[in-house]
Amino acid sequence: MIKLQCDGREIVVPEGTSVAAALLGAGVSQFRSSVTGAPRGPLCGMGVCMECRVTIDGKGHRLACQTRCEAGMEVTTT
Amino acid sequence: MKFDVVILGAGPAGLAAARAAVRAAHRTGAPVAIIDENPAAGGQIWRGNAQIEIPPSVRFFAPTRVFDIRPGFSLETDSHGTIETSKLILATGARELFLPFPGWTAPGVFGAGGLQALVKSGLSVKGKRVMVAGSGPLLMAVGATLRKEGARVVGIAEQAQLGRILPFLKRYPAKLPQAIALRARLIGVPYWTGTWPVRFEGDVVTLSSGRKVAVDYLACGFGLVPNTEAAQLLGCRLDDGFVAVDSKQETTVAGVYCAGEPTGIGGLDKALEEGERAGAAATGQPLNRRRSQAGAFVRDLAWAFHLDPRLFDLAESGTLLCRCEDVAHSELAHFREWREAKLQTRCGMGACQGRICGPIANHLFGWKPASVRPPLMPVTLETFCRDYSGRNAEER
Amino acid sequence: MTHSPDVIIVGAGIVGAACAYELAQAGARVEVIDSGIPGGGATAAGMGHLVVLDDNEAELALTKLSVELWHKLAKELPRAAEFWPCGTLWIAADDVELAGANTKLEVYQRHGLKAELLDERQLYEAEPNLRPGLAGGLVAGQDAVVYAPVATRFLLEQAKAKVTRAVVKDLDELKAGAVVCATGALTRELVPGLAVRPRKGHLAITDRYPGFARHQLVELGYLQSAHGEGSESVAFNVQPRPTGQLLIGSSRQYDVETASIDHEILRRMLERAFAYMPGLRECRVVRTWTGLRASTPDKLPVIGRLRGNVYLATGHEGLGVTTSLGTARILAAAVLGWPSPIPAEPYRVERFDD
């Protein structure tokens, strides 16, 4: 099992889980805000729509659906 | 790094191409490489399938994103520097078509394949009420996956008419057992045809039939759009939005082959067949002269799941068409062409590079997309402006 | 029976649109012809940086007049034109450049323009993402940025101009009181022998990084690139868009007319940007593109009568958006026989024969 953080909360998921799946599973539905401030979350699940972008370990605009969870990851939604 | 053959995309078509390519007799070393932007092979339909086998002599780069391809060919990747080859097989698959309706941008609305991909990447849907909607055989497959994973599939809303789906199934009896099996796994799940979502608000889906259903997730996709960006970047000719290929799966650019959905939406069988042909052709192996049925299947599938024009009128004036730049329907409707709309509203200028809103604009307004320039997908500026002058920076 | 318009303008870029606007204000009926989308050529490719440049008196006069006009127009521009008076921060890499900044300050002040010198500490307060070791800078407070394609459309609409999509092969075919040629880099096709040459530029735009930069940032060495005669040059030039995206320029190449990306020069341009703002390396690039500026031998535009009833408003190099409004005033004065707002001598086409 892998432990990671999202907005300060700890999430535990099996290895191989994507960050998007981990966040959704933990009840996080808003991953980011649109340019006019509307809540957004994953749509396409395959790295195309760019709606699942979160900050991972300080690096912005990372695609949650294309990134596998790693131990100790710090995810921030915007 | 140089290879004799590079395959872009490790879904069914790409994997079939890889298997065919390594059969070529006069091989030494590791002459074949396959690249995919996902963490593992399988593409969409085989996502998360632990039994995917990449032939041992094939070099596999994943997750690796190709952001530029130069003639000759050099593929510029974000994690493995420049990969060079003289034969390139594009097996880039397809993405879902989204059509706007009020509420489609709210969290909780996913693509149909989108939710399935998330489930295959570890999302638990146990006990979740999910409606599957949109168009295409994918909906049944998604419904079945969701149910198997413990979701309460409250219904499947297929926009296509039964009057087209049934004749299609009759025409392709080989597909019938598969369809029946899927339906069997969905016993108790209503399958509404000629029906589509018209609103998503407060976790309630309103259907065109007037029915309102409360859900946790709406999984909605209206068919597939071929991923032709790499082909366009290379200058391959497109016919009606699909990559034009000859009987050897070769595009109009010598040395570039294409297989699977980008040449026509035709599902798994077509992808396997074309992948095999492309892999064989790219390595100079003799090809089976048998005429493929794929063309007819593509046409018949498109006919059966033809999009009802009423789907293009679901957006209200405030409904967004471009999610990256928050551009609403009312801001776009009066323009006559894509580029003008882009320049005036910034629609299509966001991070998705027009992949979501471009097809929407094409269906709603008939606009044709613009040319493709690098980067094929956003990469860091550092990655993008790596020195290409002959030297190769392999970073791992 | 249809009457011919008072003025036909060939070229619906920002310069043509500004001319249409100005002439319409004076009561003229204007038709604008373009082979493509209005504002879709160099206008769409450029940065929309509204800047007062002081390399010579004529350039200073034209850019100063124009920037003042932009500030006046700003109140009427639609929100989508994204007019933002963020100012330009000219960066001095060393004491030599800082001395140059001092000279620039004096010129600005002499002309009544807002300018403020920044020492090293103030520079990093203003722009924390600049690399360490720079000497200081100069903030040109009157400078601004605008999204030119929307401004172009606005000007055409305000002018109530009839906009026609067509290819003009011969200026003499056009029947009107006056014909204005505002076709930028392509002007030689209509006016063979005119000393206007295409000068290709590259740009890149990133995803959103709000607050990463707060002014249009330009190196003081920019003018060497813009005014130099070398066949290829790059300069540090970064603009924060109101969206938070970073627009990165600038490059110059003579005699290259293809629209394709030249990776080598794009790379040099980006490396120069990294040299000033290392943090850009981590920013994600979303789009790259090119455009063709219209360049003249003395780096000043050509504004005024060419022959008979045919006028020119072209050759603006990298200052087309900035000086479109001032150009339009000068051009309208020439067409209408009014006194020019600033001396028009330096921009006459005849100067190339002198």
Image (spheres, coloured by chain):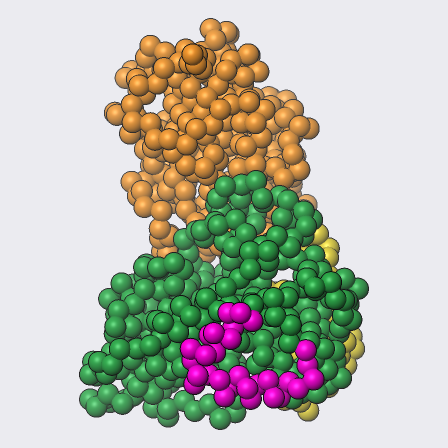
Chain colours: A yellow, B green, C orange
Above or below, A74 relative to C179:
below
Point out residue B64 in the picture as x, y percentages from the top left corner: 47, 75
User: Residues in magenta?
Assistant: B162-190
| Figure label count | 0
Above or below, B40 relative to C236:
below
Point out residue C140 in the picture as x, y percentages from the top left corner: 61, 34
For the question of whether residue A56 can be seen, the reply is no
The quarter of the displayed image where residue B299 is located: bottom left
Q: Residue at x 32, y 46 (%)?
A: C258
Query: In the visual, does C267 lie left or right of B309?
Result: left
Point out residue B124 in the picture as x, y percentages from the top left corner: 70, 84
Q: Residue at x 41, y 36 (%)?
A: C36
Given residues C61 and B350, the one toward you in this image is: B350
Q: Does the stretch in magenta take in C77?
A: no
Above or below, C62 relative to B198:
above
Task: Look at the image and tell me in which quarter the N terminus of chain B lies.
Answer: bottom left
Q: Residue at x 53, y 69 (%)?
A: B163
Q: Looking at the magenta stretch, what is its main secondary structure?
A: helix
Task: Look at the image and tell me in which quarter the C terminus of chain B lies.
Answer: bottom left
The quarter of the displayed image where residue A78 is located: bottom right
The quarter of the displayed image where residue B280 is located: bottom left
